[in-house]
Image (tube, helix red, strand yellow):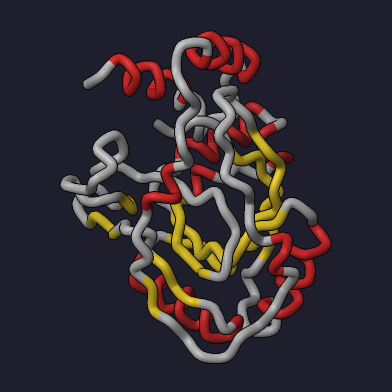
Amino acid sequence: MTVKKILCMICNVGIYSNQMNKMKIMLLCLIVSTYFVACKDSSGKFSNHSEPLSDTLSIAKQDTQIEEVYDSEVSYELNYVVMVADGYNYDSLRKIAIQTSKLLGLKFDTLDRYYNKSRRKIVLPDNHEDDLWAGDYIFRRVGGDFVSIEMREAYIDTLTEKSKIKSESFYADTLKMFVFANMYPEKKHADSLLKILKPKFKQATIIPTEIYMGCMH
């Protein structure tokens, strides 16, 4: 493993747990950035294993794309993630994800990942070209015209995060997954999408969460 990868792995500390001291991490990565060029967002490496669907629905598309971040500083941005349903059965959630994509006229995308039954987790293949994240879960941090399934622990509600007891309980559940419909920097657009989903998917809700947008490599 190269020195650059080791340093970038240091930058990744605290991606899933906002309980850590973000300022310390920011300072560390700022020092690292003095010597290395910022890393490219790894989501750009994903091949699009999607299931194209008919019908289109334009829901403030100009606000669905989260600009790729090339900053070397660790940064978290508040976004409103629209969750359709959550649970522990991947196959059931996949059916809901496909139903959601059909309703919205979008596509269902695995982002190169699959559900590892033995680990009970969504991960990239061990032989994936992204050798830093191969065999592990890498979370979605962009909007866009597709529906995906994510690990719930990567998206903590901002209210839950304020409570030590609730946040510890939240992070203790490492197996729960959810159907990710889209995410927006503005709540009004998430509300608009929720209104469309709610009649068919009663569990649908909005998760206000701070998403890590810094270096991933």
Is residue 100 placed above or below 130 in the rendered structure? below
Image-based side of 125 in relation to 9, left or right = left
For the point 49% across and 44% down, which residue is it?
153
Q: Position of residue 18 (x, y in %)?
A: 59, 29
The x and y percentages for residue 112 are: 32, 58
Left or right relative to 71: residue 124: left
Query: Can you give x and y, in whole percent of width and height, for residue 205 in the image?
Result: 68, 63
Residue lying farthest to the left in this orientation? 127
Front-lying residue, 135 or 64: 64
The single residue placed furthest to the bottom in the displayed view is 55
The residue nearer to you, when weighing 95 against 74, is 74
* Residue 78 occupies quadrant: top right
Q: Which quadrant would the N terminus be assigned to in this image?
A: top left
Quarter placement of the C terminus: top left
In the depicted view, which residue is nearer to us: 198 or 29? 29
Q: Residue at x 72, y 74 (%)?
A: 59
Q: Residue at x 63, y 51 (%)?
A: 66
Q: Give 149 or 59, whichever is nearer the viewer.
A: 59
As drawn, 8 above or below 55? above
Tell me if 21 is positioned left or right of 137 in this view.
Answer: right
Image-based side of 76 in relation to 11, left or right: right
Q: Is residue 81 above or below residue 106?
A: above
User: Is residue 83 in view from this perspective?
Assistant: no
Q: Locate residue 34, reporting x and y percent.
A: 52, 11
Identified at 32% across, 23% down, the residue is 5
